């Protein structure tokens, strides 16, 4: 419901247009107010048209029979409490990786990193999704280089960050990946800020950071 004061101003504007013989307003008056329905434009503009008429015009445009009904409706809606709405909760984050071959990317993430394929789409596939526990990675086929040269490795541009909860888990994860022959951009190390992490390099040059707490 628009502000009542704005509707009053709108009614006054209609009255001003009528007095100024602004022809487009004649069609609106004729279409909305029953007593003007048989008038042509000139007859509408020559007829008596008061502020009350303009207010009725606005009210009917809003779906009310009269200005008084509109005011009552506006007051009722203003008096009502807005219903309590729970704050929307974001439940997951999906990192999107650019790859040159969906099938090869799926093979790497399932065979080397322990993910499962949620789906692949297209024939041939151009989109897919893999997941491990609560981590989700979307795979998007791109047939041209996305980054210039070796900027990703030089600038350590991460494509995704995956976290575990304990120091034992990050150690076990690193050792299991190492045993599977996974290529690393960065080996397991403890950072100055207290995290312990390593970075995997996938076949498409995506850098995936695995992080957990230090001992």
Image: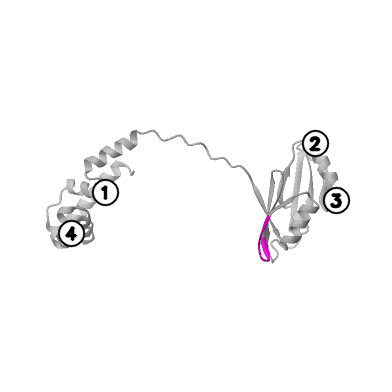
Is residue 95 located in the magenta-colored stretch of the structure?
no
Horizontal and vertical percent position of residue 62: 28, 48
**Residue 119, quarter of picture:** bottom right
Of pointers 4 and 3, the one earlier in the residue sequence? 4
Horizontal and vertical percent position of residue 209: 75, 47
Label 2 vs label 4, nearer the camera: 2
Horizontal and vertical percent position of residue 13: 24, 51
Magenta residues, start to end: 119-126
Give the CA separation, mark 4 to mark 3. Answer: 84 Å
Give the CA separation, mark 1 to mark 3. Answer: 73 Å
Which residue bears the numbered disc 4?
Answer: 21
- Which type of secondary structure does the marked residue at label 3 adopt? loop
Q: Tell me the residue at 82%/51% (across/down).
A: 184
- Which type of secondary structure does the marked residue at label 1 adopt? helix
Label 1 vs label 2, nearer the camera: 2
Instruction: Check residue 178 in the rendering and tell me which mark sits there, or answer none.
Output: none
Is residue 123 located in the magenta-colored stretch of the structure?
yes
Of pointers 1 and 3, the one earlier in the residue sequence? 1
Give the CA separation, mark 2 to mark 3. Answer: 20 Å
Which residue bears the numbered disc 3?
Answer: 180
Horizontal and vertical percent position of residue 180: 85, 51
Which residue bears the numbered disc 2?
Answer: 167
Q: Tell me the residue at 24%/40% (across/down).
A: 69
Of pointers 2 and 3, the one earlier in the residue sequence? 2
Q: Quadrant of the N terminus?
A: top left
Give the CA separation, mark 2 to mark 4. Answer: 80 Å
Which residue bears the numbered disc 1?
Answer: 10
């Amino acid at each position: 419901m628009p502000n009542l004061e704005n509707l009053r101003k709108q009614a006054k504007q209609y009255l001003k247009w009528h007095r100024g013989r602004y022809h487009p307003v004649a069609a609106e008056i004729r279409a909305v107010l029953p007593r003007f329905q048989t008038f042509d434009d000139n007859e509408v503009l020559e007829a008596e048209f008061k502020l009350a008429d303009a207010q009725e015009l606005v009210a009917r445009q809003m779906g009310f029979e009269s200005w008084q009904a509109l005011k009552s409706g506006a007051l009722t809606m203003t008096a009502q409490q807005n219903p309590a709405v729970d704050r929307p909760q974001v439940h997951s984050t999906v990192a999107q990786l650019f790859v040159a071959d969906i099938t090869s990317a799926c093979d790497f993430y399932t065979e080397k990193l322990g993910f499962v394929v949620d789906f692949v789409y297209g024939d041939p596939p151009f989109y897919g999704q893999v997941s491990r526990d609560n981590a989700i990675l979307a795979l998007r086929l791109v047939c041209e280089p996305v980054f210039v040269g070796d900027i990703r490795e030089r600038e350590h541009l991460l494509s995704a960050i995956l976290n575990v909860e304990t120091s034992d888990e990050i150690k076990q994860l690193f050792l299991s990946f190492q045993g599977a022959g996974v290529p690393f951009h960065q080996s397991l190390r403890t950072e100055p800020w207290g995290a312990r992490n390593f970075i995997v390099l996938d076949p498409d040059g995506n850098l995936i950071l695995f992080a957990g707490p230090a001992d």
